[in-house]
Image (tube, helix red, strand yellow):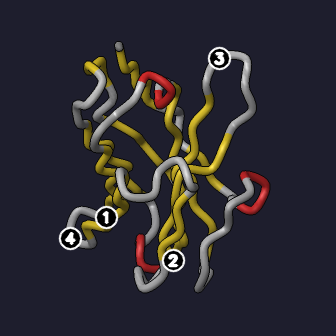
Amino acid sequence: QVQLVESGGGSVQAGGSLRLSCAVSGVSLSNYAMGWFRQAPGKEREFVGGVSRRGDVTDYADSAKGRFTISRDIAKNAVLLQMNTLKPEDTAVYYCAARFSSGYVGTRSSWYDFWGQGTQVAVSP
């Protein structure tokens, strides 16, 4: 059974940084494409970034490019989202998601098979 557990959320001032972690259990991370999404109050869930199962392909939303970086810790079976230069508009619940055995990165939430419970990020002005 695939389980995804996010951690690392919190409150930070604009310009600060946070690192989110998504711990994957039940399966090997190397067999799954992983994505990060976020959902702000009253808005639809949106793609933030993702990495292919081999880790050789990454993709980011325009809002994340240059500020956010996705990486994988194979030893810990976890996916990390390093977020720098945070803005108030980055405030949202952040979710990680997984899809079995894919060599590329999906940007639509329906493409993913498994989801974590989310972690809250709040950025104050």
Image location of residue 57, percent across then percent down? 48, 81
Looking at the image, do the residues carrying marks 2 and 3 touch, with CB atoms under 8 Å apart? no
Q: Which image quadrant: the N terminus?
A: bottom right
For mark 4, does the 10 Å Cα neighbourhood hold few (<14), some (14 to 19), or many (20 or more) residues?
Answer: few
Nearer-N-terminus badge (3/4) = 3
Which of the marked residues, 1 or 2, is nearer the chain's N terminus?
Answer: 2
Q: Which residue is mark 2?
A: 52
Per the image, the residue denoted by label 4 is: 75
Residue wearing tag 1:
77
- Dot 3 surroundings within 10 Å: few (below 14), some, or many (20 or more)? few
Point out which mark residue 41 bears: 3
Dot in front, 1 or 2: 2
The residues bearing labels 2 and 3 have C-alpha atoms spaced at a distance of 29 Å
Q: Earlier in the sequence, mark 1 or mark 3?
A: 3
Q: Amino acid at mark 4?
A: Ala
Kind of residue sitting beneath label 2: Ser
